[in-house]
Amino acid sequence: MTKKNCLKEHRVNRDWCKECGICVHFCPRGVLVLDDQYKAVARYPEKCICCKLCELRCPDLAIEVITEKVDHE
């Protein structure tokens, strides 16, 4: 049995988000969108593959992808 990273939570610091949309463009699964205030929000977290590209590419460090290890066969 192996351990697999599984999404626990997307944390978006709305005070730090500068509405650039870089996270939205880099997300390979379309998880993130900009809301009516142009702030990032995880609209489809069930599609997340935990690649953390949004977290790594955010110039304002406003996104954190929290994962947990779960047993996987």
Image (cartoon, rainbow, N blue to C red):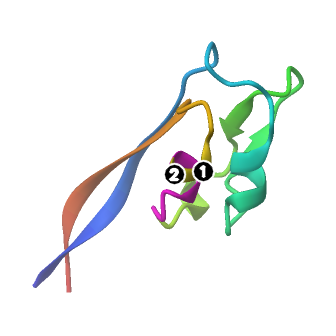
Which residue corresponds to mark 1?
57
Q: Which x, y percent locates residue 71?
A: 16, 71
**Mark 2 near mark 1, Cβ–Cβ under 8 Å?**
yes
Which portion, as a residue range, is magenta? 50-55
Residue type for callout 2: Leu
Between 7 and 58, the one lying in front of the other is 58
Q: Which mark is residue 56?
A: 2
Of helix, strand and loop, which one carries label 1? helix
Residue type beneath disc 1: Arg
The label shown at residue 30 is none
Query: Residue 38 placed where, x, y %?
Result: 85, 27
Query: Could you tell me which quadrant the N terminus lies in?
Result: bottom left
Residue 34 spot, x, y in % from top left: 81, 36
In terms of depth relative to the viewer, which is nearer, 41 or 19? Answer: 19
Point 60% across, 30% down: residue: 60
**Residue placed farthest to the front in the image?**
59
